[in-house]
Image (spheres, rainbow, N blue to C red):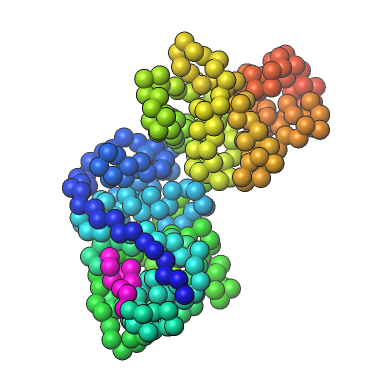
C-alpha cells in the first residue's frame, strides 16, 4: 500500500473579511498567496458573496461543479476568509487512489496496521487540526472511508487504521468537492445519504464556463497576463481585442477554465503578429490556435467545435456563425469570407440561432 504524499500549506495571512477585491470568475492568488475570487458574471458574483458568508461560519462545505470550474480554488478562498485562515490548509484528491491508500492517508495508521506499515503515521485529518482539509473528488471514497469520515464529522474523533478503539480528537473543517451528482449516487447506493446530508451543511454549485461568457473575457485577460509574466514579456504586453474576446466568449469550453487557459497561452505564444503597433491579439491571432480549439485530433477534450476539412463551405460558415452568436463580422474575419456572402446565406437559407 502506498501512502499518498501531501504538502501541508501553512498559511498565516491576515485578511479583512469585509474587503471588496477586484471582481472575475476563478480564484487568483495575490503576491502573498491569498486567493481572490474574480467574478464578472452575476452568477459568480452571487457565489462569491455566498462563499464569503460561508467562510464566516463553521461546518462542512460541499462545492459541486464540472471539472475545471475552480471548485478547489473557491474552497481555498473560503479558508482564507474564515477564522481558520491562520491555520494550515491542505488540498488532497481521493480520485487517484485505491481504497486502502485513501483510508490510510485520511485517517492515519499505527505501526503494522498493514504489511508495509513499519511505523505509525498521522492522517491528514490529524495533521490539519484547527485548519481546513479540502477533499477533492469526495465521490471516490469507498463505503468504509465514507463511514469513517461520517464518524469524524459527527464526533470529531479519528480512529486510525490498526487502532479501532483508540481515538484522537481533532478540530478540522472539511470542504469537499465533486463533479458528480451525489444525489444520484445516493439513489444508486454508491454514496451514503447521511454523509451527504452532513457535507452539504453549506453548499455551492459552480456553473460551467459556457454559461457565463462575461467571465470568459475577464479570465482570458487574466490568463494572458499570467502567461506573459512567466515569459518575462511584461515590457511588451499583449492584450486581446474586443473581437478576439467575443470569439473566446462564444466557445463552449467543455473543459472550462483549464481549456480556456490553454487556448490563451497558445494564442500568446503562436498567434500571428497582426498588431505590432498596439500589442493586441486579434481574431487572426486566434487562427494560429484554431487546430487546438476546433480540431478533434488536436484538442484534449475532443474538439470544442468540430470543423472537418470535408465540411462544405456553407456548413462551415453556418457552424461558426452559430457559435459566435450570429456575429457576422466576427464570422467573416475568422473564415476570411465577405460579410455579403454570409448575409446572403442567412437570407436565402433562413438561418436562425438556436
Q: How many marks?
A: 0
Q: Which residue lies at the image location 69% right of the left edge and 18% below the top edge? A: 336
- What range of the chain is rendered magenta? 120-128
Q: Which residue lies at the image location 35% right of the left edge and 46% below the top edge? A: 48
Viewport quadrant of the C terminus: top right
**Pick the front one: 43 or 119:** 119
Quadrant of residue 38 within the rendered picture:
top left
In this view of the protein, can residue 222 be seen by the observer? no
In this view of the protein, can residue 276 be seen by the observer? yes
Tell me if residue 123 is in the magenta stretch.
yes
Q: In x, y percent, where is residue 143?
A: 49, 78
Q: Is residue 316 left or right of residue 95?
A: right
Quadrant of residue 123 within the rendered picture:
bottom left
Quadrant of residue 23 within the rendered picture:
top left
141 above or below 9?
Answer: below
Q: In x, y percent, where is residue 182?
A: 51, 66
Q: Which residue lies at the image location 69% right of the left edge and 22% below the top edge? A: 335
Q: In x, y percent, where is residue 252?
A: 59, 40
111 above or below 47?
Answer: below
5 above or below 325?
Answer: below
Q: In x, y percent, where is residue 316?
A: 74, 29
Tell me if residue 104 is in the magenta stretch.
no
Amino acid at each position: 500500500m502506498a501512502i499518498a504524499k501531501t504538502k501541508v500549506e501553512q498559511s498565516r495571512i491576515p485578511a479583512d473579511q469585509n474587503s471588496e477585491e477586484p471582481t472575475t470568475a476563478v480564484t487568483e492568488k495575490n503576491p502573498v498567496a491569498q486567493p481572490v475570487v474574480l467574478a464578472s458574471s452575476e452568477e459568480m458574483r452571487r457565489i462569491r458573496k455566498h462563499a464569503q458568508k460561508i467562510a464566516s461560519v463553521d461546518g462542512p462545505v460541499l462545492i459541486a461543479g464540472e471539472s475545471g470550474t475552480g471548485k478547489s480554488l473557491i474552497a481555498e478562498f473560503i479558508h482564507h476568509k474564515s477564522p481558520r485562515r491562520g491555520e494550515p490548509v491542505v488540498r488532497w484528491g481521493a480520485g487517484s487512489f485505491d481504497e486502502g491508500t485513501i483510508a490510510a492517508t485520511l485517517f492515519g495508521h499505527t505501526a503494522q496496521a498493514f504489511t508495509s506499515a513499519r511505523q505509525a503515521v498521522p492522517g491528514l485529518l490529524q495533521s490539519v487540526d484547527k485548519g481546513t482539509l479540502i477533499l477533492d473528488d469526495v465521490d471516490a471514497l469507498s463505503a468504509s472511508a465514507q463511514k469513517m469520515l461520517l464518524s469524524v464529522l459527527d464526533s470529531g474523533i479519528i480512529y486510525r487504521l490498526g487502532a479501532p478503539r483508540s481515538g484522537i480528537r481533532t478540530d478540522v473543517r472539511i470542504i469537499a468537492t465533486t463533479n458528480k451528482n451525489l444525489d444520484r449516487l445516493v439513489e444508486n447506493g454508491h454514496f451514503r445519504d447521511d454523509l451527504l446530508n452532513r457535507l452539504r451543511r453549506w453548499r455551492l454549485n459552480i456553473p460551467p464556463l459556457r454559461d457565463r461568457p462575461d467571465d470568459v473575457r475577464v479570465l482570458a485577460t487574466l490568463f494572458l497576463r499570467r502567461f506573459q509574466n512567466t515569459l518575462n514579456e511584461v515590457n511588451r504586453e499583449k492584450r486581446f481585442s474586443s473581437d478576439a474576446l467575443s470569439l473566446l466568449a462564444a466557445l463552449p469550453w467543455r473543459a472550462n477554465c483549464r481549456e480556456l487557459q490553454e487556448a490563451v497561452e497558445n494564442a500568446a505564444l503562436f498567434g500571428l503578429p497582426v498588431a505590432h503597433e498596439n500589442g493586441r491579439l486579434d481574431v487572426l491571432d486566434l487562427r494560429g490556435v484554431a487546430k487546438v480549439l476546433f480540431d478533434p485530433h488536436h484538442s484534449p477534450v475532443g474538439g470544442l467545435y468540430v470543423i472537418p476539412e470535408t465540411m462544405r463551405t456553407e456548413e462551415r460558415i453556418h457552424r461558426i456563425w452559430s457559435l459566435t452568436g450570429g456575429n457576422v463580422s466576427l464570422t467573416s474575419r475568422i473564415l476570411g469570407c465577405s460579410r455579403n456572402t454570409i448575409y446572403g446565406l442567412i437570407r436565402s437559407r433562413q438561418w436562425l440561432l438556436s
